[in-house]
Amino acid sequence: MNKNDFNIEVEGMEFKELADGVKIPVLGIGTWKMGGGLRADRTQDKECMLAIKTAVRLGMTHIDTAELYGNGHAEELVGEAIKEFDREALFITTKVKWSNMRYKDVIEAAKRSLKRLKTNYIDLYLVHTPNRSIPIEETMKAMDYVAENELARFIGVSNFSVEQIEEAQQHAKNKIVANEIEYNLLVRDLGQHTKDMESKIIPYCQKKGILIIAYRPLAKGELAKPGIKLLDELAEKYGKTQAQIALNWLISKPNIVTIPKAVRIEHIKENLGAIGWRLSEEDMRRLDYGFPVKDAFYNL
Ligand SMILES: NC(=O)c1ccc[n+]([C@@H]2O[C@H](COP(=O)([O-])OP(=O)(O)OC[C@H]3O[C@@H](n4cnc5c(N)ncnc54)[C@H](OP(=O)(O)O)[C@@H]3O)[C@@H](O)[C@H]2O)c1
């Protein structure tokens, strides 16, 4: 396949501002479980690379990955998959893991990620999750180093509460431009790693201009299945699928973008059908207040 086969068809994609006039697509592609879970698994490499390439070609140019995913192998897959594309057309987010939050470790982890991604800069580098046993001041000083030495264009956090964002920002010269958190129709205020997403974190981030990157937008596929009455009703009413309704609800909210993961090409295409139209205000309200929320349902 030659490079021209992978022209990016951004027509129709919607964007939101991250910072400094830089905009990212409302739908990106997630990569957790591509290339393994906590360990590398190479058995589905071809399918995963094709999924990443297809997503990018169709305009999902934001790729979300992490050093944790597949113990680095997800980043390697991203690095292979993006070879075909103009680097500047892509927006790559990756994350430093919980156990690498010491000053030197953050910087070394960023450099290893760059090698695996085969690129000379990360677009957005995130602290994957708070680590209370290491002072956040130390971690954020290293995040500043990463930004100031152009290993990453932007820095941010993931799974941070309002208080944790405020504390982290106090110790960083560079603005925290994004907080990646669990948020979907089913999980609103009690996720696996955060609480008060809808009641506190999102309003705070909206006020401060910190972009929310909503992860697990389909509740790991639960929201793509029929069986939830209101979702089924709206899918029928709009002639959309349950997944498209769930994603549309998210991206219709100010300051929120999302990153559904899909290896299956038909899932990627279906998810793209979440853009280019809007739920009515009344139906947004019904989903806001009338949905059978199952906070922390992973723990049930
Ligand atoms: N920062 C963090 O701590 C954190 C935590 C979790 C996740 N994340 C990021 O967020 C991304 C998304 O979260 P996630 O992967 O956990 O969950 P998700 O995106 O809610 O769900 C992914 C699952 O849904 C399936 N799926 C996707 N589109 C579908 C469709 N249209 N119809 C039916 N099924 C569909 C996928 O199947 P196939 O793959 O078979 O197509 C996969 O099994 C991750 O990949 C990762 O990049 C970040």
Image (cartoon, rainbow, N blue to C red):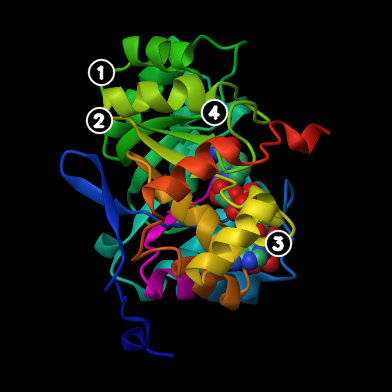
Where residue 278 sits: x, y (%)? 37, 58
Earlier residue among tags 1 and 4: 4
Closest to the camera, between mark 3 and mark 2, is 3
How far apart, in angstroms, are the residues tagged by discs 2 and 1? 10 Å
Earlier residue among tags 1 and 3: 1
Closest to the camera, between mark 1 and mark 4, is 4
Q: Residue at x 38, y 24 (%)?
A: 203
Earlier residue among tags 4 and 2: 2
Which residue in the rendered view is the most extreme toward the left? 21
Mark carried by residue 173: 1
Q: Give the range drawn in magenta.
A: 54-67
Disc 4 under 8 Å from ligand 1? The reply is yes
Q: Does the CB distance between marks 2 and 1 fall below 8 Å? A: yes
Earlier residue among tags 3 and 2: 2
Closest to the camera, between mark 2 and mark 1, is 1
Q: Residue at x 41, y 69 (%)?
A: 56
Residue 34 appearing in the image: no
Which residue in the rendered view is the most extreme toward the right? 300
Ligand 1 picture quarter: bottom right
Identify the image quadrant of the C terminus: top right
How far apart, in angstroms, are the residues tagged by discs 1 and 3? 44 Å
Residue 296 appearing in the image: yes
Q: Which residue is drawn at 38% across and 47% down?
A: 281
Q: What residue type is labelled 1?
A: Lys
